[in-house]
Image (cartoon, helix red, strand yellow):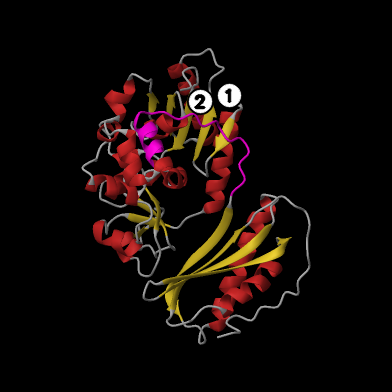
Amino acid sequence: MGLDRRIAHLDMDAFFASVELLRYPELRGHPVVVGGRRVPAPDGEPGHRTFGRLGDYTGRGVVTTSTYEARALGVFSGMGLMQSARLAPNALLLPADFEAYKEYSRRFKQATLEIAPIMEDRGIDEIYLDLSGFDEPDDVLGGRIKQAVCDATGLSCSIAISPNKLLSKIGSDLDKPDGLTILSWDDVPLRIWPLPVSKVNGIGPKATEKLKMLGIQTIGELAQVPVKDLQVHFGGYYGHWLHQASHGRDDRPLETSRQPKSLSRETTFERNLHVRNDRAELTKIVDALCRRVSEDLQRKSLTCRTVGLKVKFADFSVVTRDVSVSYPIQSADQLRQVLADCLRRVAWHDRIRLLGVKVSGLCDSNERQTLSPQLTFWSGA
């Protein structure tokens, strides 16, 4: 059960939006949405910066993040910008600046490593820390880490400290923003069981809906179901995991060096593109996606053996195709050539709204093969 473990989950508060507010402090307290492209701002008074309104946005795109003021209006990450504009037309819209976010991510992680060197990196804005060997009380140590993050970035974060990763992941969301949550085993019935089952990382929308159909909506209700009954409905492994998770049990160690199973890049177009009439533009888009995936591979010192294509059409149907090769590849030219076979195997029945490139079968091998970099987009169309 890991009774002596102390695991922290640190989650940056509205990370992308908070980075933007460092540059535009006059927007603090206002509903701000980050995503899409820049919207022309209205003329303002001399010496005053002006910003575009979400209600003036036209085209595709999704919300990358939003401030807590925008979330109070119903605007959350992953929503379409046009849908969000109907909910909060007066919210201010800023384009995403991922290079800036990566830099601030590097800063906060470096600051925490100087205090707690055992870290599991979970993405650009969240990490786990193993605090088991520290003598300081949880609240003192958590406060010290929060202050170090603030000193390094000017940003706030929320931290939960508990006996394991599962409880800390749930806990870091309980007192946002700028929260410090300490959870013990005694807190599971008091603070965890009243929460909806969807708060458990690993219980997704489908499982949540199935549990609801069984009359189970809270973690506490799930904890009262015998494990054998859960296994009847969810299978042996997942049913057992659901029972363990509902009681806050999780013995997973921190993964301090984690290799991803796949990498992908995709883009949604401002307008639907035609397979032949927009061939030149589509070719440039595929070139850019392959280049970005290749840069991701190089940055992580990885190669791949499978290249995949994702196409979303104007009717919202999605087609995926992939090709595996017998040798590791990494360069953009190699990715483009392998991708050509995927392109030939797609039935282009409608205009295109999204393209994506994904690589898997990742490995650390330095072996390379040279392929001729010849790709004519839609050559098989």
Disc 2 target residue: 145
Tell whether 55 sits left or right of 348. left
**Which residue is drawn at the image coordinates 45% and 43% (left, top)?**
15
Chief secondary structure of the magenta portion? loop
Depth check: give the residue in front, 101 or 8: 8
The reply to whether the magenta stretch includes residue 66 is no
Task: Say if mark 1 contacts mark 2, CB within 8 Å.
Answer: yes
Residue at (42% x, 34% y) in the render? 169
- Residue that badge 1 annotates: 115
Residue 369 percent across, percent down from the top left: 78, 65
Residue range corresponding to the magenta coloring: 239-260
Residue 158 visible from this viewpoint: no
Using the rendered view, name the quadrant where residue 336 is placed.
Answer: bottom right
Which of marks 2 and 1 precedes in the sequence?
A: 1
Mark 1–mark 2 Cα distance, whole angstroms, equals 7 Å
Number of numbered discs: 2
In percent of width and height, residue 100 lies at 54, 49
